[in-house]
Amino acid sequence: MTMLVWVGVAVLGGVGALGRWILDGLVSARWGREFPLGTLAVNLTGAFTLGLLVGAGVQGHVLLLVGVAALGSYTTFSTWMFESHRLGEDGERRLAAANLAVSLAAGLLTALAGWLIGEAW
Amino acid sequence: MNADCLKLTIYFGERDRAEGRFLADAMLDRYERHGLATSVLLRGIEGFGAKHRLKTQRLLTLSEDLPMVSVAVDTRQRIDQLLPEVTALMGDGLITLERATLVAGELDEIAPPEELAEATKLTVYLGRNERTDGQPTFLAVVDLLHRHGVAGATVLLGVDGTAHGVRERARFFGGNAKVPLMIISVGAGETIAHTLPELGALLERPLVTLERIRVCKRDGRRLADPHPLPTGDLGGLGIWHKLMIYAGEEAEHHGHPLYLQLIRRLREAGAAGATSLRGIWGYHGDHPPHGDRLLALRRKVPVLTVVVDRPDRIHRWYEIVDQLTDETGLVTSELVPAFRATGPDLLEGGLHLSNP
């Protein structure tokens, strides 16, 4: 069983990373001119899904596999920080601040929304 | 010195492939095999091409496929031999040929050709870690150019290339001392000529090119309009036009970075392509040489933006450039005698040199 969980974490981690790469790439190529919308999109959808899982009372191995492995590699803190720093480097202070504030506020709200929906289910 | 040389410039994408590997590698292997006197492979920071797909290093996911520019200079004969191989390798992208004077060896006795009297672009090719009197040679060269009143200079770091026919490629581990970098400078022909003897003394094995250009703007001031060029020569061969915009990375227009605005506006207006390259050191106009400082958020390095298109279209792009560089920036105009753009359902131009 433990071995299976290890393999599951590795595989779902890979799936999460692929999902992020695809969604971020699509959104960035289409709308990501000034603002890192691709990263925002993966972080918000990830926060929503994790809220949904926890709200629905998912526990144990499933939470580990989906919450930690898949969503852990799907969402990204480092890219959020990196792209905010890049905006600062470009002198786009407002956009940098907006990227930090919007991700934080909208992230909390989408996680909460996911949690409420999960709980009501 | 050889006044009959050609500069081959190729604009493509970092992830473009040929022969089952990266196009950049395949291309530089050809340059090595032909023993090119000088070539430098540069990675851009922002740009677009015929497909109008934006490439940028600002977003992590998009920064795995940045614009690449390779510049190679050698005799007309050697470049002519190389060309069929290069065009066979190319997928989507742009190839241009320009006439240049290549000086390898002694710089002391060079009198620049008369045609260089108007304004001249001097490009110096040297190793990344070449040193003179204990300091990096590129710093000494930029200081020299600045001291002599040359209008601007930008140091661009290569990631691969050849020098005097020998391949020098950057590796992740290693000193990379000989990997080529290029210093592009622009100034009055006479001023540039005065710098040459001292420049020769700074360089171990001098390798420089001289090209004829026009300075259109300096520090936001209009000096001359771009050359009025016909779209073809008497023999019916196409003539093309190149604008280069030199500004600091910190330069802004209405509160936004200048180079980003340039790329954005040109892309929206439908230009054939544009590429921004970030230098590591340099200056333009009346500013002292500058580069990054420790612990500063804003970068202070020079950024160089290139646009090549048909002369009738360049006039439209120049209006955009002129608007955006109302306060700062050095803008130059050059004639490009051969241009070949390929893209999806697109083949424009050819590689026979026109004679304007």
Image (cartoon, grey):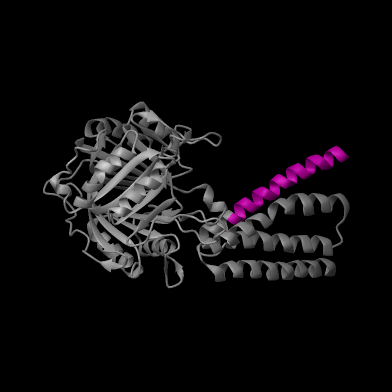
Question: In this view of the protein, which residue sits in the foreground, B276 or B11?
Answer: B276
Residue B314 to residue B129: above or below: below
Looking at the image, the residue that sits furthest to the bottom is B254
Q: Note whether residue A76 is visible.
A: no
Residue nearer the viewer, B200 or B264: B200
Q: Tell whether position A2 is magenta.
A: yes
| The quadrant where residue A39 appears | bottom right
Asked if A33 appears above or below B179 in the picture, the reply is below
Residue at x-position 11% and y-position 49%: B234
Residue B124, position as x, y percentages in the image: 32, 42
Magenta-drawn stretch, dominant element (helix, strand or loop): helix
The reply, left or right, for residue B1 in relation to residue B164 is: left
Residue A88 vertical placement versus B156 (above, below):
below
Quarter of the image containing the N terminus of chain B? top left
Query: Foreground: B141 or B242?
Result: B141
**Vertical order, B98 against A45 (above or below):** above
Q: How many marks?
A: 0
Q: Is residue B209 left or right of residue A58?
A: left
**Res B222 quadrant in image:** bottom left
* Image position, residue B14 (x, y; %): 47, 44
Please provide percent x and percent y for residue B146: 32, 54
Specify the segment rendered in magenta.
A1-24
- Could you tell me if residue B140 is visible in this image? yes
Find the residue positioned furthest to the front.
Answer: B133
Q: Position of residue B219 (x, y in %)?
A: 32, 65
Q: Nearer the viewer, residue B170 or B345?
A: B170
